[in-house]
Image (tube, rainbow, N blue to C red):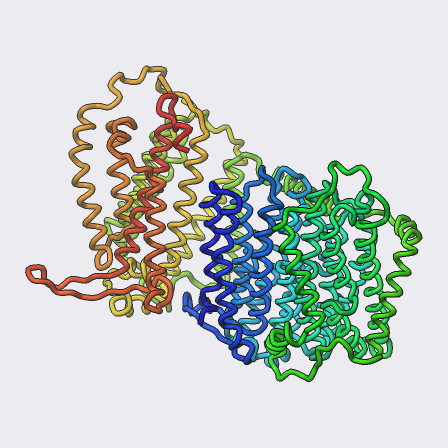
Amino acid sequence: MYYFWVPFLPMLGIIVPLLTNKLSRSACALATAILPALGLCFILLDLPAVFAGQSFSQSIEWIPQLGLALSFRLDGLSALFSLLILGIGLLVILYARYYLSEKDHMGIFYCYLIMFMTAMLGIVMSNNMLQLWFYWELTSISSFLLIGFWSHNSDARKGARMALTITGAGGLALLAGIILLGQVVGSYELEVVLNSGELVKQHPYYLAILSLFLIGAFTKSAQFPFHFWLPHAMAAPTPVSAYLHSATMVKAGIFLLARFYPVLAGTEVWFVVVSLTGLFTMLLGAYIALFKHDLKGLLAYSTISHLGLIVLLLGLNTNLAAIAAVFHIMNHAIFKASLFMAAGIIDHESGSRDMRQLNGLWKYMPITATLAMVASASMAGVPLLNGFLSKEMFFAETLDQSILGAMSWLIPVLSTIAAAFAVAYSLRFIHDVFFNGEPKRLTKTPHEPPRYMRVPVEVLVAICLLVGLFPNYTIGPLLQSASLAVLNTPLPEYNLALWHGFNIPLMMSGMAIVGGLAIYLNRKHLFKFSGTFPDIDAKTEFEGFIQMCVEWAQIITQKLETESLQRYAFCLCFFALLLIAPPLFDLESTQGNLASPPINGAVIVAAILLIAGSMATVIWSHYRLIALLMLSLVGLVVSITFAYFSAPDLALTQLSVEIVTVVLLLLALYFFPQHTLTSKSRPSHFVRDLAVASLIGCIIGSICFALMTSPLDSISEFFIANAKTGGGGTNVVNVILVDFRGFDTFGEITVLGIAALGIYKLIAGMRLSIRTRDHDGRLWAKDKYPVLLSVVSQSLLPLFLLISAYIFMRGHNLPGGGFIAGLITSIALIQQYLAHGVDWMTKRVSVPYRYLIAFGLVTAGLTGLGSWVFGRPFLTTWFEYISLPWVGKFELTSALIFDLGVYFTVIGATLLILASLGKLTTRERIKEGER
């Protein structure tokens, strides 16, 4: 099946516009459209099977223990949304080619647009709920970039921030709901979840799951009370509005409700909450839309209203209502995208979107006017257009419900009123813009757009007409297959016809048209009435809320951050005491069932050295070099302790880290003030700190003693038993790092690389002068790099590198590995910096260390991805024993390549930090070009 490649094609296409941006604008647009067009072709190839009622799914396991898999599905609902996403997306690419000005960076815009397209395809085609959530959040991030594309515009920045805050918060709620639902069902795969409706509805967690899912859906689809972000997102370029806010992003919440309809729908809570939320949103959006003077503002609130209509249909207790909802999803996407594009053309060619200035444009742009009027008529539900058909089905379903009991008649009445307002704001869009006198105070004379800028609108309006006239032939099979996927049960009978005879839904349509005309003719009175209410600006209120949060954060920060390290340490230790001390009082004795560890001369000496080093560090803290030596003594004793307790890997790691840390602190101390004042803490503070430190020492000591004398049932037995058979190595610690917990290690080296890059950028911005004298006022020695140190260091370099290679190669079976070997290599190279200077090393080591980080991470990542080729989970280790003549039997393992990635990442991160810190002088500081 071709569908599996559809989400990946746009993902690959993200970089295409950046690579082709230097070409002509048309070439960049064409190159950007190639991969989405190929994805659309793949969907069309699988469409006949989908129309036949088939659904397909395919997955690649990633972390099966967590229910994570790369899993996609294609059924009627995902096919419908994929066609909308790819089809309208291609039209938007063509439209944006002419809409964006020469000043706009077309490559970046297309990059963001294709990223969003990828995210939407991931949502609608995901067969795993956790994967769906990942793409869900990616839509929030990419829409933030698109809405704020004109970053020089304050409204765009604020609108983007508002959209990200609201939809991002909804995404967190959705994640909680997905985790609960996965725990209830026992799987995160949609194929399992969609067939577990009865189990979910009868579970005690059902209300919590439903609430969290609805928050996620309502925030994304701008339902009351989360509707306010959508109008302010209109600060985005019009191609963004035509794509995100008609056919894709705002439909993501609708898709969520439709996809999980078999699981969550069918209860009284669902019907009441969903239908009433949709009803109120529909009325509110339709009413406010009439009073908006901005074209895109009117369309934004009309979008809110139509989304409320779809939500209301999904909330009604009938299968036909769900079919009507699916039908209106298609129709709304088509006519609303064309209207947004028409509004963009009007703005582009007249310089304004204010309907108080845009009058009589029929005379200047008759073709655009005709297209916009047809799309507006479809939005109003005028017969012979697609909007009329789904509106008729909507009216019919409002009559066949009993949500409010005896008061259920209110729903069809209110629906008719909302439809009348839809007619009124559609009439306003048509009459105020294209007729009603002459244009006023426009910055340029209106005219028709470039020929191909109008093509997307023409295509969409043609679809409105074709679906309205021939619904069974144009949209019938797609509607049937999509509805089947939503209901997950056999479909009831329904008829897509232009004429159903004289009936109540037709009468409601007639009343809506007549009522809408009457509302528009009396709009002045409504405008006057609306003006009596205070004008509440959601953007101002939202920004005020954000500023209030910032102020509270500043107050709390000022209370907590007193720039006193002593106070920070006290607070940390004090709260640690509160958390870990109480459970100890429940123990009768810290002595467990096992014998106490033996105390011999070595233990006593180590304890004395540890205590002496700690006390010396405190007493002589203002003598920096002595304090550093005492700290290194403590680290050395800890390393020996690890070795004593049979943890050689930890001992080697601790020892290597200690050496690197000493070098780091020596470099840092070089730039510190020459003198450190002796602490003048009050006696009461001294007693307080001593008491807290003593308590912490006693409690941690008691915990350690209890652990060492108590039998523990840990997972270590599993690792010991499976290290050789499952990971191919006898060094259990290394096998855990590169195999059993390889994903953790990959995350840790990624964090290490990010931290190193962050420190490097911070250091690159510093300007510190060279110290010319020591703390006693004596000049530094003229011989900066002593000959003896240089010769010895250079002689030791090959030995260090040989030891590093040995530690690396044996790490899978004996103490060692990539991390320790990387630290040893880093120590060897930093020693050359100390012995010879930056200039000497720069001439001999020309590879930027940040490239080593990138190489290491890519190597480790590709090792993990390689297991997918063989159908295994991410980072599954392969190993085999091979015999060669004169060599004998030896082991080959993929973990060695992963460890190589760890090795290079550690070297790159360590040297990037230390070498950059060593360059912090007036002569050898980091150059601008190195940043």
Q: Residue furthest left?
A: 886
Q: Is residue 304 visible?
A: no
Q: Position of residue 364 (x, y in %)?
A: 76, 45
Left/right placement of residue 62 relative to residue 818 reads right
Q: Residue at x 82, y 39 (%)?
A: 440
Q: Is residue 727 above or below residue 368?
A: below
Q: Residue at x 7, y 62 (%)?
A: 885
Q: Position of residue 339 (x, y in %)?
A: 71, 55
Q: Quadrant of the N terminus?
A: bottom left
Q: Nearer the viewer, residue 345 or 222?
A: 345
Q: Quadrant of the C terminus?
A: top left
Q: Nearer the viewer, residue 755 or 309?
A: 309
Q: Locate residue 441: give its quadrant.
A: top right
Q: Position of residue 86 (x, y in %)?
A: 56, 61
Left/right placement of residue 740 relative to residue 311 reads left
Q: Is residue 233 visible?
A: yes
